[in-house]
Every structure is written in C-alpha cells, then in structure tokens.
Image (spheres, rainbow, N blue to C red):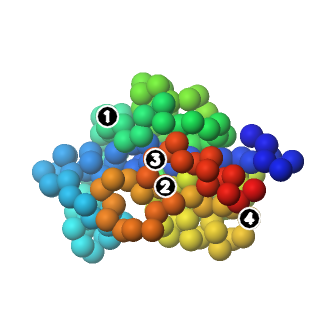
Amino acid sequence: METMNTRVSIGLDVDDVIAGFYSAMCKKFGKEEIQTDIWDSKGYCKFIVDNFDKIRLDEEFWRTLPVLSSPESITFDFDYYISSFPIEMFEARRAWLKDNGFPDKPLLCSKDKLTTCREYGINVLIDDKKSTISDVMCGGDVLGIWFRPHYMIEDGQDIDNLNQVMDIIESYA
C-alpha cells in the first residue's frame, strides 16, 4: 500500500480485534460478558489473569475463539498479523486464521510490539490495547490505531470497525 510515495506496512492484532478472546474467556469460566475495561486486571477482568494458565496451552480454546471482526470487514491490505499469545499455540492460531477465512499473511508472536514493528518495518499497528497504542505512538515511527471492541467501555477510540482503518491512515498522510 502506497501513501504519498511512502510504503505503508500494516500490522493487525488478533485477540480482541478479529478474535473474541474476552468473549471466549467469559464463556469458558462462566462469567457474564459485560462492557468493561478488558485490560483492567484488578477489576472485573481479574478472572482472565487468574485463569490464563488454564487456557495457556489449551489448543481447543485457541482454535475455537469466536470471530469478532469478519474477514470481510478488512477493507485494506495489510502485511502481518502481530499478536501476543503463547508461542506454543502458534499452529493453533494459524489454523484459527485459516479456518475462519482470514487472509493468508505472516503471523508474528510478540511481547513487545514496538520492537517487532521496527524489526519488520511495520509503520501502522491496529491493536485493542490502549497502552500498546501509546507505546508505539511514543516511539515516533509507528502509527497506532486503537481498535475498541464492542465490550470495551473506555471512550475515545480511533475505530470500532476495521472498515474505518483507511480513513485514519489517509488522515495522517
């Protein structure tokens, strides 16, 4: 994708952008799916941190996450999936993407997305974690687009549907 003679390389997060990780955790552990700050590990979503080890290596869990954003909602070309997940579940994540009809793109497992973006030449990252967006924006060389899933209560999102991505990118061109 070219914008103003500059190559735009886009990384797309998976969990809580295209895959419903929070929804799956709620279902698995009998929690009501409410509007909440899914990154608040001390509030309602503490159960996610408390139970993560129970799903960490559960291939069935990772292969059966619900689709949050359909492949058809991705109205832009992108270069990589970049996501934080247990590396042992790499093949399960790849299978989930294929089984749900998502574009065949390289999959990167990352615990430090700014470093990964720099390493792979990614200059736009779409992610649901506001602190990740802040980190990449503060780095100065990656545009972070905050995706807010429907169950996130915090306001001020950049987008809540992937078909809005190009409007954001073009506004920065």
Q: Residue at x 71, y 55 (%)?
A: 123
Is tag 2's residue or tag 1's residue first in the polypeptide sequence? 1
Q: Which residue is mark 1?
A: 64
C-beta proximity under 8 Å, tags 4 and 3: no
The quadrant of the picture occupied by the C terminus is: bottom right
Q: Residue at x 70, y 60 (%)?
A: 172
Disc 3, SS: loop
* Residue 65, position as x, y percentages in the image: 33, 39
Quadrant for the N terminus in the image: top right
Residue 59: which quarter of the image? Answer: top left
Distance of label 3 from label 1 (alpha carbons): 22 Å
Res 110 → quadrant: bottom right
Q: Which marked residue is nearer to the observer: mark 3 or mark 1?
A: 3
Q: Confirm whether residue 124 shows in the render.
A: no
- Image x and y of residue 75, in percent: 57, 36
Circles 3 and 2 in contact, beta carbons < 8 Å: yes
> Nearer the viewer's eye, disc 1 or disc 4?
4
Element marked by disc 2? loop
Rate crowding at label 2 as few (under 14), some (14 to 19) or many (20 or more) other CA atoms within 10 Å: some
**In screen coordinates, is 148 left or right of 137?**
left
Q: Nearer the viewer, mark 4 or mark 2?
A: 2
Residue at left offset 79%, top offset 43%: 2
Residue 133 visible = yes
Tag shown at residue 159: 2
Circle 3 residue: 161
Amino acid type at image mark 1? Thr
Determine which residue is flagged by label 4: 141
